[in-house]
Image: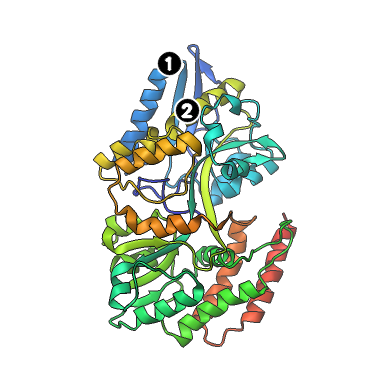
């Protein structure tokens, strides 16, 4: 699944997605007037006026610094639609430099729609500074097919004010699922419609969170070889049993279920929810769009202490792109997204000036001196209470960072059924739910 935004600032944009454009995207003629022309996507839509103005200004600055390159951006909201993504690839409509979720990378390579850029990344100044585990996502059989741009990891957002009112220590968020259950019960005990803990259970989002909760307890959704389901396990049973117990025994999850992300964000923003799982980029949405307050919203690592789900995005190159277009595209990525403290994602001073949140605890993209510079510039321009996120930063250091499973959306659809069942049926049979879901997931994986 996607998270909700760009790596650190632009809350008006949800995670980018593809949409079909009226004209072909890939360039058949990559040179004109001595220039190399490249089409790129994930441009902010016109409705996101500030973000779009930044994007356009940065392209203009890039073209001025590189007069031999012409960048043709295509806007879309969101920038990748799973319903049209494969059709766009197969129909030759993909841009020369195109946006992908981490979970897309291997699939795009498997269907032979990505250019091998292994021999070109040596010229990408920032490539060696990017976290190795993120670079590995776009490396298949030793060949490089893309460049990561952002990352996120799941954690636990909680309301410090409700913790205090419930007699809990807001500086000590729950570190285990047992502690989370106890905290949720205490918060729900405040009454007046207050819910202790909420979880998604529809539109594939329940399966997404089931996966994150499995990772947090050291479990997995598919086997290491990606061929079989691995949810019918003690960890899988623990995930569903915990949800069932909180829903029906503790009454700490409220009576309204089949929730999706907007429902839960609305609950948290209104001050009626104690905790839910999310990535850091939910926080500005809770404040800017849902009525929340930065000082009340804190972030902790995933309960369980074993692992967390990570996601993110990057760019790949059309298999028809010429060597000149690949080189130009890499230069554009370097300037636009991969320069610490500068560019569309890194100009923290510009973000602060335009009242975009700076200082959220996103996973670090860079390493070494590049990371130090990025953190220094971010810290100097922070405009959110960074101390509220320190537990998340500290706790994440010891967690296993795991990407989403293969065929993620199809698997999440299956797991939605199991999660929604335990939250809506008091007599739901967990063993049967896991057994049935396992069979369906095995079938999905067998089809590749």
Residue at 49% of width from left, 67% of height from top? Answer: 303
Query: Which residue is more in the foreground, 222 or 41?
Result: 222
Q: SS class of the residue under badge 1?
A: loop
Q: How is the image coloured?
A: rainbow
Residue at 55% of width from left, 58% of height from top? Answer: 399
- Residue 293 rendering spot, x and y as whole percentages: 26, 61
Q: Residues within 10 Å of mark 1 (few under 14, many from 20)?
A: few
Task: Please determine whether, in this image, residue 373 is positioned above or below residue 187.
Answer: above
Residue at 49% of width from left, 64% of height from top? Answer: 302
Q: How many marks?
A: 2
Q: What distance separates the C-alpha of mark 2 from that of mark 1? A: 12 Å
Query: Which residue is more in the foreground, 301 or 193?
Result: 301
Q: Earlier in the sequence, mark 2 or mark 1?
A: 1
Residue wearing tag 2 = 332
Residue at 31% of width from left, 68% of height from top? Answer: 160
Query: Which residue is more in the foreground, 278 or 365?
Result: 365
Q: SS class of the residue under badge 2?
A: helix
User: Would residue 46 be seen by someone viewing this image from the given angle?
Assistant: no
Task: Please determine whether, in this image, residue 68 is positioned above or below residue 309.
Answer: above
User: Would residue 251 be seen by someone viewing this image from the given angle?
Assistant: yes
For the residues bearing labels 2 and 1, Cβ distance under 8 angstroms: no
- Residue 297 rendering spot, x and y as whole percentages: 32, 62
Query: Which residue is more in the foreground, 136 or 398?
Result: 398
Residue wearing tag 1 = 67
Query: Quarter-wise, where is residue 70 in the image?
Result: top left
Query: Quarter-wise, where is residue 417 in the image?
Result: bottom right
Task: Please determine whether, in this image, residue 249 is positioned above or below residue 439.
Answer: below
Q: Residues within 10 Å of mark 2 (few under 14, many from 20)?
A: many
- Residue 233 rendering spot, x and y as whole percentages: 67, 73
Left or right position of 158 against 371: left
- Residue 84 rendering spot, x and y as whole percentages: 55, 47
Task: Please determine whether, in this image, residue 163 is positioned above or below residue 89.
Answer: below
């Amino acid at each position: 699944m996607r998270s909700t935004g760009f790596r650190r600032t632009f809350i008006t944009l949800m995670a980018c997605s593809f949409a079909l454009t009226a004209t072909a995207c890939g360039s058949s003629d990559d040179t004109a007037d001595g220039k190399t022309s490249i089409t790129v996507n994930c441009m902010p839509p016109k409705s996101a006026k500030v973000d779009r103005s930044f994007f356009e200004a940065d392209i203009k600055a890039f073209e001025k610094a590189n007069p031999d390159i012409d960048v043709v951006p295509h806007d879309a909201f969101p920038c990748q639609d799973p319903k049209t993504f494969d059709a766009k690839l197969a129909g030759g409509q993909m841009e020369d430099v195109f946006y992908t979720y981490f979970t897309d990378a291997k699939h795009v390579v498997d269907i032979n729609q990505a250019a091998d850029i292994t021999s070109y990344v040596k010229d990408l100044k920032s490539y060696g500074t990017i976290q190795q585990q993120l670079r590995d996502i776009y490396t298949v059989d030793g060949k490089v097919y893309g460049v990561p741009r952002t990352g996120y990891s799941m954690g636990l957002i909680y309301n410090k004010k409700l913790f205090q009112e419930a007699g809990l220590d807001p500086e000590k968020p729950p570190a285990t699922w047992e502690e989370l259950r106890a905290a949720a019960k205490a918060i729900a005990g405040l009454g007046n419609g207050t819910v202790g803990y909420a979880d998604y259970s529809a539109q594939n989002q329940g399966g997404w969170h089931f996966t994150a909760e499995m990772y947090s307890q050291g479990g997995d959704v598919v086997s290491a070889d990606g061929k079989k389901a691995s949810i019918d396990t003690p960890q899988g049973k623990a995930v569903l049993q915990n949800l069932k117990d909180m829903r029906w025994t503790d009454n700490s999850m409220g009576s309204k279920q089949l929730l999706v992300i907007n429902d839960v964000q609305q609950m948290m923003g209104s001050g009626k929810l104690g905790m839910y799982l999310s990535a850091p980029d939910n926080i500005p949405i809770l404040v800017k769009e849902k009525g929340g307050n930065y000082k009340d919203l804190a972030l902790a690592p995933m309960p369980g202490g074993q692992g967390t789900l990570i996601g993110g995005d990057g760019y790949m190159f059309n298999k028809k792109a010429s060597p000149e277009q690949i080189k130009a595209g890499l230069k554009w990525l370097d300037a636009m997204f991969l320069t610490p403290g500068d560019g569309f994602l890194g100009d923290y001073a510009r973000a602060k000036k335009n009242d975009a949140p700076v200082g959220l605890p996103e996973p670090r993209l860079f390493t070494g001196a590049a990371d130090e510079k990025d953190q220094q510039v971010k810290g100097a321009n922070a405009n959110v209470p960074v101390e509220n996120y320190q537990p998340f930063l500290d706790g994440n250091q010891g967690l296993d960072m795991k990407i989403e499973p293969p065929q993620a959306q199809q698997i999440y659809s299956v797991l939605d059924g199991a999660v929604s069942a335990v939250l809506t049926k008091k007599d739901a049979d967990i063993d049967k739910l896991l057994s049935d879901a396992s069979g369906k997931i095995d079938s999905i994986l067998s089809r590749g």
